[in-house]
Amino acid sequence: MQQTVDIESIIDHYPGVQESMVFILQDIQEAFGYISLENMQAACDHVGVPLTHAYSMATFYKSFRLEPVGEHEIHVCLGTACHLKGGPRIVDELERRLNVHAGATTEDMRYTLETVNCLGACALAPVVVVDKEYVPKVTAKKIQKTLKTITDNE
Amino acid sequence: MGIANLAEKIDAKRLESSDDLVQLRREIQMRQDPNQVQIVVCHGTGCLVSGSPAVTRAFKKVLGETDIEAKVMPGVKTTGCQGFCSRGPLVTIMPQGIFYERVSPKDVEDIVEQTVKNGKPVERLLYKDVNTGEPLQTMDEIPFYNLQTRNVLKNIGTIDPTDIYDYIAVGGYQALAKALTTMTPEQVLEEVEKSGIRGRGGAGFPAGRKWRGAVQAKERKNQPLYVVVNGDEGDPGAFMDGSVMEGDPHAVLEGLILGAYAMGSEKGYMYVRAEYPLAIQHLEMAMAAARELGLLGDNILNTGFCFDAQINRGAGAFVCGESTALFTSIEGKAGEPRPKYVRSVEEGLWGCPTVLNNVETWANIPKIIDKGAEWYASIGSPNNTGTKVFSLVGKVNNVGLVEVPLGTSLSTIIEDIGGGIPGGGEFKAVQTGGPSGGCIPYKHKDAPVDYDSLTKLGSMMGSGGMIVMDKRDCVVDVARYFLKFLEEESCGKCNPCRLGLTRMREILDDFSKGCGSEQDIEDLMSLATSIQDGALCALGTSAPNPVLTTLHFFKDEYLAHIKDQKCPAGVCKDLITYSIDPDACTGCGACAKQCPNNAITGEKKEPHTIDTDACIRCGICEETCKFNAVLVS
Ligand SMILES: Cc1cc2nc3c(=O)[nH]c(=O)nc-3n(C[C@H](O)[C@H](O)[C@H](O)COP(=O)(O)O)c2cc1C
Ligand code: SF4
Ligand code: FES
Ligand code: FES
């Protein structure tokens, strides 16, 4: 669903008041996968605040990104339940396999590895979300399979 | 079933009076045949993840292909989280209430054939009693459910959260109609005060007192008053608020409207965590449906009362659960807390009087108004009235949502309802209150769970997270985990929190590597005190709690790390060694195949060995071995 909307239609959807800022940034993030400088500027012009304002928000809230994401997004839950049941081990394993640090994107722009805090499915800990698909009770073996499915499907 | 479907069945029109609502409820109830077979599939987040959508699809397909008379065709209903997520996907067949666990699409034919058509249970899918192994047929027979007092959770798992008619059928919006037509705002407020309900999201401040303060401020300052739902649920590892919003969104909304009526508010906000897309969707549907029926918006139930609400999605910041930060975030800024010289009931959103309550607090309000303050106050114990929902997770057999009267003991919750820990024995400790709470050891298992008792133990109620730990969980690691979480989530506005937490975490990092001294423990304590005294908001002031409680109750375990360079629980990577028990190892080779560093060798069918130097202690072999042959020391 990325890149299907233009920035004007996102912005014009909201009144030009500061209160709209979070909504606009969220929609930009959703539509483009990240918030580019141009889009940030457009949002600020609409709302009537300096660029620094949007920048401070985009860096304060974790769900906003300033860089484009990889083709596939992998989120490993590190909420307490998942931490106790081996979440960190899964992060380590993915960092090794994909050769990327949590919070970053592989050089070939294929994978972005992220950690999150609790997805509300603690009974199935540890949980990983791969391209919006939840993988419950993840093990090192299961994660390899999941990665393989991604490659196979291409 | 969505609104569109229902509109065809029942003529949906604006309700103009409380009689209209009663009439509508009768109509819905008349159309619901109590003897009709209903297949209820849990579509809470947990069961969705474990595969319930495929089960629902399978039911629709199999039923479509089966020759059942249209008249007696079973309905398939999807609900919010039924609480027993570790057993999902859950399916219940009504009206008998036959309860099936871990249902997969391939079980569906048997269920339709045996249960739906012939009323007989499919034994292999029934829950088995942990002690006797005896299969139990209905929820009421299962200790996990029958030891609870489900009040807030009552509708969740029985109603379709996307269907306002389902909510109305079980008495939804009855409290609102009662309040608007037979009670003055003052009477509603008094009822909430008399119930004694304390806030379910944080410090346990009496809701009635908060409301009263806001009304007084509103009158004095002659400003609008805002009502706000705190659905930020920041505690990582707790999911009760998410489940309530997802599974019974109308209850939260009705509570909010009642609050607005009591306090004379025209505008409300629901601040919901972005990680809960389903909760957001269900709340949106609930608001749209309520507006259509005239239960939200202008001239509600034709009484002249106007109130509307909107949803604000969080953007991923734990600190935004804090009241002033949450307001700043709604105002469209980075959510930094501000000093509370002036209470937010006086100066909240845009400087106006504002009442912020937790999801569960709001969801209780319709029940209080409907059944009365006396009924509510009779549950629980004095000063700790009502029930509380806990999210019971970690090393416990029955992971899920548990609702009990305040004052229920930890052991009832963990051992009787939770079924104890996997493998049996005593639990080691339980963390209540999330990152701001504390770690309570087994020896206090009989402590009543209420606001005051938990505070006395150095922990707190928080919003109801309960994380059970066993002997394979290291308290140093857990304390470090929470500190790291808070360090990352600290907004950085004040020094004690920004610098202090980092320093505390560094000391714990050292401990986990076997470095450190008893002097460091002293330093930890003194840092903790400075942060408690000096931080601006409760994120900072409560952050040292996990460290302080673990130091208090588990000092030996800390000393083992720094004096003996040992992690007794076998968690801290730098202090453990993996080896293989030659007697247990079957030589299957599964671990060797998984080891990322090729540290495991051995002949097929012969015991394998781990090369300690090559081992990077990732723990994958332990996770992989089916014979428990991998040892940690
Ligand atoms: C850092 C921090 C995070 C918080 N997170 C939440 C939260 O996620 N949900 C919540 O209801 N309260 C949270 N609180 C407590 C709120 O500030 C506030 O006390 C509460 O929402 C009031 O509602 P109640 O009186 O109904 O409990 C948090 C407090 C702090 C300091
Ligand atoms: S205590 Fe921490 S989170 Fe709270 S205002 Fe200070 S720096 Fe920010
Ligand atoms: S802690 Fe991972 S889903 Fe809750
Ligand atoms: S999600 Fe089904 S029981 Fe919790």
Image (spheres, coloured by chain):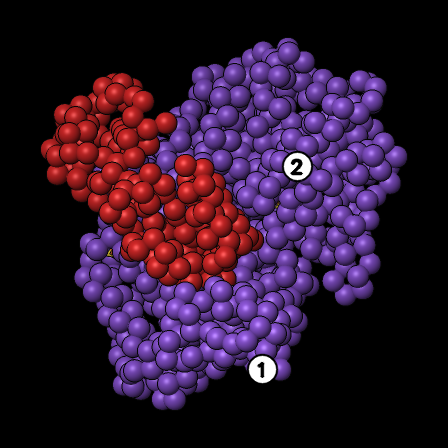
Chain colours: A red, B purple
In the image, what residue occupies the spot 31% across and 42% down?
A: A110
Q: Is residue A44 visible?
A: no
Q: Please state which of residues B263 and B432 is positioned toward the viewer in this rendering.
A: B432
Q: Quadrant of residue A100?
A: bottom left
Q: Earlier in the sequence, mark 2 or mark 1?
A: 2
- Give the quarter the ligand 2 occupies: bottom left
**Residue B79 quadrant:** top right
Q: Residue furthest bottom?
A: B564
Tell me whether circle 2 and circle 1 mark residues in contact (CB < 8 Å): no
Do tags 2 and 1 sit on the same chain? yes
| Badge number at residue B55 | 2
Instruction: Answer left or right for B430 relative to B74.
Output: left
Q: In the rendering, at what x and y percent does residue B617 appear?
A: 41, 72
Residue at the location (66% across, 71% down)?
Answer: B424
The residue located at (16%, 26%) in the rendering is A42
| Nearest the eye: B18 or B193 | B18
Q: Which mark is residue B582?
A: 1
Q: Amino acid at mark 2?
A: Val
Question: Can you say which quadrant of the picture contains the N terminus of chain B?
Answer: top right
Ligand 4 within 8 Å of disc 2? The answer is no
Residue visible at 69% across and 55% down in the picture: B144
